[in-house]
Amino acid sequence: MSRPLVYGPFNVTLLEGGRNPRPGTAFVFSLENGDTVVLNRRLSASERLRYRYRYEVNLSDWGFTWDDQFPSSTGGFDFQVRLSVGWRIWDPIEVVRRNIIDASHVEVRLRGHIQTAMRPWALEFAIEERADAEKEMNARSRTLIQQMPFGIEVTECHVRLSLDEATETHLQQKLGLERTYEEQERVGLLAIQEARTQQGLQTMRDNYQNEQVRQRFENLTTAASNEETGLLRWSIAENPGQTFEILREWMDRGERTQQQKIELVKELVEKGLIQPADADPILQKLMEDTRSPGAGLPPAQRSDGPGAPSALPPAVFLPPSETVQAQSEARPEPPSGAGQETAGQQGLPRFDTGTGAQHASPVPDGVVGWKSVGRKTAQEEQDD
């Protein structure tokens, strides 16, 4: 389909040379020697004799669109391109001189010029960078809006990039593989980080255990240099759940006097190494032992020391309330009946009821000795 830009040439005559140009057109006149001139007015009579031909040039805005393919940096795959270009004639004389009489002639020239400029731009981008490539190429296309030397001016240029079906499928497969690789890499990095964390925690645990072993060795060495008391403190500190058993075993040993043991137990309570609830039964037992004959003496010099027959039942470690009850139950009952000893023969105190009968005085719990006071009986006066 023809889209003429230039109409003519028309011979200039005395009758037709005086018409004014229509809007959006320009008159180009040529002389006998071939020189041309633009006159947008009516010719005078002398000018009609001077000019030989008249050309009417269309100065309207023109535009066209075409599809193309530009190579990408991804080998074997191209961008699908749609370009829209606007243009118009800015130099009618040059158009006439170059005999550009149809719009198709202009489009051929502009298409070659734009392709030459844009192909290197497209090669800078891969197919997965289509959006970035389109944005950049549209920005650079502003440099193409210019006046061309053949009388045409580019007024606008717009680029739209897309991918064909085969390229789109290839791109989706590539992106899927990259996502899979990135996920595997992320999982691998997480596994490495987790392993390093576990290794660090294990190193911290090992260092802590080594420090505990070293500290225990130092404490044991220090305790051993402090004879029995140091070892006792170390044993209680290392085994807080067995405090009562450790103290009981320590009491059964006879290297120290009862008073020294009492002082040591009190010291352990003050320093917080043992609880008062654990120390109360021990202190009570030690206090009772100090009231017995020979208390405060080494075991070898006491009447109840090792090898000496004990008049008391074996000591049993019980809570305070149970200890008192056990002592009452362990005390022997006075003998009764014919042929048995009287209360006086067992050393129990007597009191006179005023009727001449004498009764044994029961010994209260917790009393380790007694002494008769008050008026003597007749038998006691005779004995004196």
Image: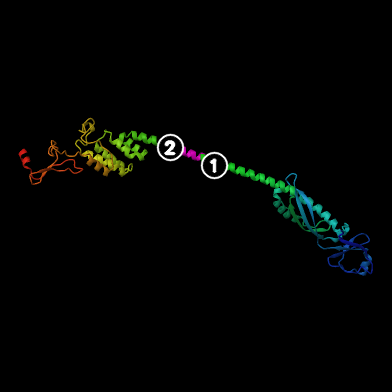
Q: Amino acid at mark 1?
A: Glu
First to last magenta residue range: 199-207
Q: Position of residue 127 (x, y in %)?
A: 72, 48
Residue at 42%, 37% in the rendered image? 212
Q: Quadrant of the N terminus?
A: bottom right
Give the mark, 2 or 1, whose residue is nearer the N terminus: 1
Q: Tag 2's secondary structure?
A: helix
Prevailing secondary structure of the magenta residues: helix
Drawn side of residue 80 relative to residue 38, left or right: left
Drawn side of residue 340 relative to residue 189, left or right: left
Q: Which mark is residue 194?
A: 1
Q: Which residue is mark 2?
A: 211
Drawn side of residue 108 relative to residue 375, left or right: right
Q: Is residue 245 above or below residue 5?
A: above
Question: Can residue 8 be spotted in the picture?
Answer: yes
Kindly indicate the quadrant of the structure image that contains residue 308. Answer: top left
Q: Amino acid at mark 2?
A: Glu
Q: Position of residue 293 (x, y in %)?
A: 19, 36
Q: Residue furthest left?
A: 382
Q: Quadrant of the C terminus?
A: top left
